[in-house]
Amino acid sequence: GPLSERRLMDVRLGELHAWISTCSFSPQGLLGAVQRAWSSYCTKYIHVKQGGPAGISMLLAGYCLLSYGWNYQHFSK
């Protein structure tokens, strides 16, 4: 795609100067960049798929490790 529509992580090092020159540094352009960054962060770390076997197994594994840690002296005798 066009250089101006690429994300920072998709720009090659040699194209970085040209990519920066296509960015808008007006208040509206900066606000749009902050909103896109926040939306990307929320999508990746906050609004993840809920449920499923992975979440339940991590919860059970954590409980087992915590219980073993609490009862270690009893198990070691």
Image (cartoon, helix red, strand yellow):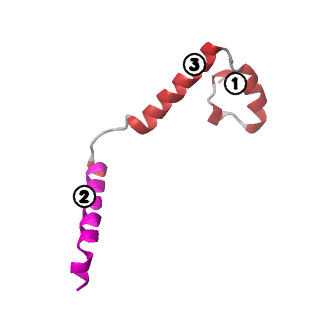
Residue that numbered label 2 is attached to: 60
Q: Secondary structure at mark 1?
A: helix
Q: CA distance from mark 1 to mark 2?
A: 47 Å
Q: Residue at x 69, y 21 (%)?
A: 23
Disc 2 marks a residue whose amino acid type is Leu
Q: Give the residue number, with chain letter if any, for mark 3.
A: 31
* Residue 7, placed above or below residue 51: above
Q: Decide: few, some or many residues near mark 1? Use Cα within 10 Å; few <14, some 14-19, many ≥20.
A: some
Identity of the amino acid at label 3?
Leu
Q: Real-space Cα distance between discs 1 and 3? A: 20 Å
Looking at the picture, which amino acid does disc 1 mark? Leu
Specify whether residue 8 is painted magenta: no
User: For residue 42, which quarter of the picture?
Assistant: top left
Range covered by the magenta-colored residues: 55-77
Which residue corresponds to mark 1? 3
Give the image location of residue 67, x and y in percent.
Answer: 24, 66
Q: Main secondary structure of the magenta part?
A: helix
Answer above or below: position of 17 versus 64.
Answer: above
What residue is drawn where x is 76% and y is 22%?
21
- Above or below: residue 35 compared with residue 11: above
Quadrant into which the C terminus falls = bottom left
Q: CA distance from mark 3 to mark 2?
A: 42 Å
Give the residue displayed 57% in from the left and 19% down from the top: 31
Q: Earlier in the sequence, mark 1 or mark 2?
A: 1
Residue 4 location, x and y as percent? 68, 21
For mark 3, does the 10 Å Cα neighbourhood hold few (<14), some (14 to 19), or many (20 or more) residues?
few
